[in-house]
Amino acid sequence: MKEQQAAVTSSIVQAMRSAAGTPIPSAHLDFQSQQTHILQLLQQGHLNQAFQQALTAADLNLVLYVCETVDTQQVFGQHPCPLSQPVLLSLIQQLSSDLGTRTELKLK
């Protein structure tokens, strides 16, 4: 079990460090620019990269923006899910950090 946990943790760290699909470093973008870039990724069907961009920005409001914008059927209505395991785990972690606010959106 500890080996599996270490492997998952390593995958998350690797995914968060990876700039694949993120040609512009998010640290240099303001919120509006990040929203625009994420919207472009979503419109192109790059769901995993869009969520990864929001998650690596370390801004819960940006993550919530993606959750509001994306059609849940695009994400969870497909098999297999288009989100990678590290992105899913990070998304769950960030959304569950404060379930007292915007609870319905987070549960959706």
Image (cartoon, rainbow, N blue to C red):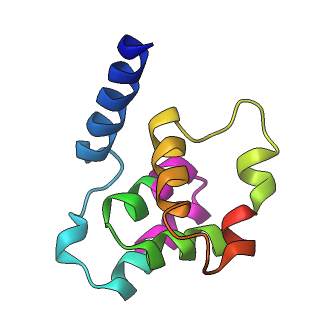
Magenta stretch: includes residue 42: yes
Q: How many marks?
A: 0
| Left or right of 17 on screen, residue 59 | right
Q: Is residue 90 visible?
A: yes
Range drawn in magenta: 37-51
Is residue 61 depicted above or below 87 in this figure?
A: below
Write down the quadrant of residue 73 in the picture.
Answer: bottom right
Residue 107 location in percent, x, y? Answer: 72, 63
Q: Nearer the viewer, residue 91 or 83?
A: 91
Q: Quadrant of the C terminus?
A: bottom right
Q: Nearer the viewer, residue 63 or 4?
A: 4
Q: Quadrant of the N terminus?
A: top left
Is residue 78 depicted above or below 59 in this figure?
A: above
Residue 15 location in percent, x, y? Answer: 33, 39
Magenta stretch: includes residue 41: yes
Is residue 102 depicted above or below 91 in this figure?
A: below
Is residue 106 depicted above or below 50 in this figure?
A: below
Write down the quadrant of residue 23 in the picture.
Answer: bottom left
| Left or right of 65 on screen, residue 8 | left
Write down the quadrant of residue 5 in the picture.
Answer: top left
Identify the residue at image location x=49%, y=68%: 63
Identify the residue at image location x=50%, y=42%: 89
Residue 62 location in percent, x, y? Answer: 45, 75
Identify the residue at image location x=65%, y=80%: 102
Q: Main secondary structure of the magenta part?
A: helix
Q: Nearer the viewer, residue 70 or 94?
A: 94
Q: Is residue 46 visible?
A: no
- Judged from this view, the residue extending furthest toward the left is 28
